[in-house]
Structure formats: structure tokens, C-alpha cells
Amino acid sequence: MIDFHCHVDLYSDPQNIARQCEERGIYVLSVTNTPSAWEHTDRLLNGYKRVRTALGIHPQLAKERKSELGLFRRLLPRVPYVGEVGLDGSTQCLGYWEDQLTVFNAVLEMCEGEGGRILSIHSRRAVSAVLSALSAHPKAGTAVLHWFSGSFRELHRAIDSGCWFSVNEAMLNSTKGRALVTQMPKDRVLTESDGPFALAKGRAALPWDIADAVRAIATIWEVALEAAEGQLLSNLRALVSDYRVGAADVTAEPPKMPLPGRSK
Ligand code: MN
């Protein structure tokens, strides 16, 4: 199973979560909300083969943490995955929209400078602005829109721009979410928990709750559970192997979660 957007560092015992994911064979993209959190989290989770910690700067923290863009720049050459980054257009976040744009555009520009990254992107009420920023930075890498909640029109614009999607249980529990997932290209879908923020079974979601999401996806795709699992895994492999990453040291790291290859 795959959890492509999980805030492992925000559980009370991150290493226990990582250990259980290893035992259950779950690949985890551990996203972080600030560059300073990346350093700590990567140190904590570095030994787990299937866990990768992404470098992030969350849009809701853009105002208070834009001072950490320098740290982001220094760390980025070492990190093949970026997230959580993006834009949030909800009312309570519009007061610092300019800061959000500054931070997100700076992140995309740095990713371009490093030859591209795989990005886990927040786009709540801001899909159009996210897609515009991405199209202004065509070499920033591969965008995986996490917990997509835009319109059908925005979905198709995102698909046309080459975006991928990480899908969670909350989406699959809503009629609109399921309709969106139905229209996503099967070969660009991954699963995520967004734990511990998202809820599952009335408590903070855990990576292994993704079993339910996979079942729901199998139903939507009208395939057997094993076939859905196989498709999702081959999607992950394709994402990381089709990918071109400029950072020279990336492939030198020990094998953990599949890494972006330095292809063609
Ligand atoms: Mn998140």
C-alpha cells in the first residue's frame, strides 16, 4: 500500500508509525510543513526503507515561515520530494495570499533550478492559481495534487497539465469526491491518509486505514482489489522512474522508497 501524503512527524510517536508501516509494507511519503521540521523528521525517520521525508513549507504557514525559504534552498539539493507546498484560497488564509504566492513561486523556481522534484501540493480553493503557478514553472517537476477538492472543470485542467492525484478516504466517502476520482486517469492516482489531520473511523487517520481507500478505488475502477493494488503500485514506480532529477546525490542514497531515477 501507499500513503503518499502523511504528516508522520505530527503523530505522538512518529517512529512507531514508521515501524508499523515497514512491517505492513506501506510506502510512505512523510510530508513536512516547514523546512526546520524536515531536518528533525528526516533524522528521525532516515532508517526506514519505505519512508521518505519530503521538504515542505505549508501555505497556511507562508506568512510566519517565509523566513525559512533560505533554509529550504539549502536543503533542496538533498531531497527528491517536496511537500507539503501549495496555495490555500479559503477565507481565513486570504489575508496573506501575497505571502503564499511569494513562497509557492519561490519553491517552484528552486525546484526548476534543481532539475525538478516530485511535489505533494495543497490546492484547497486555489486550484486555478496552483495550475497557473505550475505552468509558469514548467520544469518544477511532477505535481501530485493532494486531497483534490476543486470543480470538474478544474480537475480536467489539472489532468491536461499533467498533474497526478493522491486520493484519501474522506474524498472517497463523499459523492462528489468519488465522481472526481472516477474521472482521474487511472495511471496517475495514488493513495494518501493525510493523517493525523484527516479523520478515519472517528479518530486521526493512520497509514494502514488506506486499505479502505484501496477497496473504494477498486469499486470505482470496477476491478478486483488485487488489481487496484497492483495499478497503484505500478503508478508509484512509474512516477519515480520516469522522472528526471538533477540532484547528483539522489541515486547515491540507499534504497528506501523508490527514488526518482536519473533517466534519459
Ligand atoms: Mn496535509
Image (tube, rainbow, N blue to C red):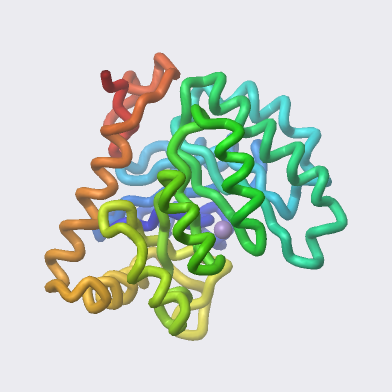
Ligand 1: quadrant of the figure: bottom right
What residue is at 40 percent from the left and 14 percent from the top?
248
Give residue 243's position: percent from left, percent from top.
33, 31
**Left or right of 66 in this view: 110:** left
The answer to whether 184 is drawn above or below residue 99 in the figure is: below
Q: How many discs appear?
A: 0
Q: Is residue 255 visible?
A: yes
Which quadrant of the view contains residue 73? Answer: top right
Vertically, is 6 above or below 149?
above
Q: Quadrant of the C terminus?
A: top left
- Residue at screen point 61% across, 33% down: 136
Outermost residue on the top side: it is 248
Residue 204 in the image, given as x and y percentages of width and height: 52, 74
Residue 36 visible here? no
Q: Nearer the viewer, residue 193 or 254?
A: 193
Q: Report x, y in % for residue 16.
A: 42, 58
Q: Work out whether residue 16 or residue 78 is closer to the camera in this orientation and state it.
A: 78
Note whether 108 is above or below 148 in the view shown: above
* Quadrant containing the N terminus in the rendered view: bottom left
- At x 42%, y 68%, the residue is 168
Q: Which residue is depicted at the point 23% across and 78% down? A: 219
User: Could you say where residue 43 lies in the image, as x and y percent from the top left?
Assistant: 51, 36
Q: Is residue 211 left or right of residue 34?
A: left
